[in-house]
Image (cartoon, rainbow, N blue to C red):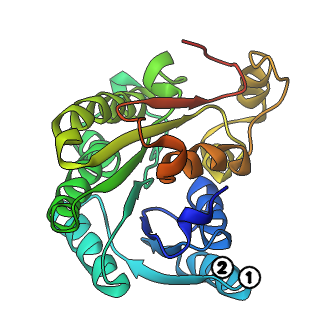
Amino acid sequence: MFEELEGKRVLITGASRGIGAAVARSLGRNGAIVIVHYYASEAAARGVVDDIVNAGGRAMLVQGDVSLGSEAAAIVERAAEQMGGLDVLINNAGDMLGRVGLEEMDDVQYDRVMDLNARSVVAASRAALSIFRCQGGGNIIHTSSIAARNGGGSGAGLYASAKGFVSTLTRNMAKELAAEGIRVNAVAPGTIATDFHGRYSSDAQLEAARSTIPMGRLGTADDCVGAYLFLATDALSAYVTGQVIEVNGGQLTP
């Protein structure tokens, strides 16, 4: 089904752990050439690359801070140089950076959250445009969140707002770039049991979330992989653009 992914050149930001790592491993197993981006978790990122290579795939590392616009652009350019081009950009890097309520928010926290979750998406996507235009097309997949629609939990207002930005930007970019053969979509995971929630959510918060999920369990990183593979495969999704695919076990439905 995914034979088309063989040799496809993919950059995944924030791919050292969680959903990004799971997507990287799956793309690698299906023949894609994968650039695993990381910021600080070098050992974990190398582990993802090793897993792909040991399974017979091709993968490389790129390091950088995507919250800095110029560095996000440089990451895309370096990745394209390493692979000899770029077919799919997956803007996955993001983080809540702590639960901070309105009263405790300051300009520093605002900038940190918005730069990482929103500015990085704009900067990396913009850098990919010239590459895609030279190649006659391309594919961008953003990672949004269920928080973009339900507002997020306590102290997650900035993160949820940034993800709302990502979902809206997805729709606008799709309209703007469709005529150039560039598709833009997003995946919006629900409550996924990764180290993200290990850092920011208590057992009580996770149980409260689980109780609202019709499928009766939290999601896993692997539960999210199929949506990314679908969007990365033209044979399956060539007529799909401007969409935000919800992967949440029924926790939130359109």
Q: Position of residue 179 (x, y in %)?
A: 18, 41
Q: Position of residue 229 (x, y in %)?
A: 58, 52
Q: Residue at x 34, y 23 (%)?
A: 103
Count of numbered circles on the image: 2
The disc label shown at residue 241, or none: none
The disc label shown at residue 52, or none: 2
Q: Position of residue 106 (x, y in %)?
A: 26, 36
Residues under numbered marks 2 and 1 in contact, where contact means CB atoms less than 8 Å apart? yes
Residues at marks 2 and 1, CA–CA distance in whole angstroms:
5 Å
Which secondary structure lies at badge 1?
loop
Determine whether 74 is above or below 118 in the image: below
Q: Residue at x 33, y 78 (%)?
A: 79
Q: Residue at x 70, y 80 (%)?
A: 51
Quadrant where the image shows the C terminus? top right
Which secondary structure lies at badge 2?
helix
Q: Position of residue 170 (x, y in %)?
A: 31, 35
Outermost residue on the top side: it is: 254
Q: Residues within 10 Å of mark 1 (few under 14, many from 20)?
A: few
Residue identified by numbered label 1: 55
* Location of residue 243 by image quarter: top left
In the foreground, 219 or 229: 229
Instruction: Give the left or right position of residue 153, taking residue 50 as reference.
Output: left
Outermost residue on the right side: it is: 216
Instruction: Give the left or right position of residue 72, taking residue 202 as reference.
Output: left
Instruction: Specify the amino acid type for callout 2.
Output: Ile
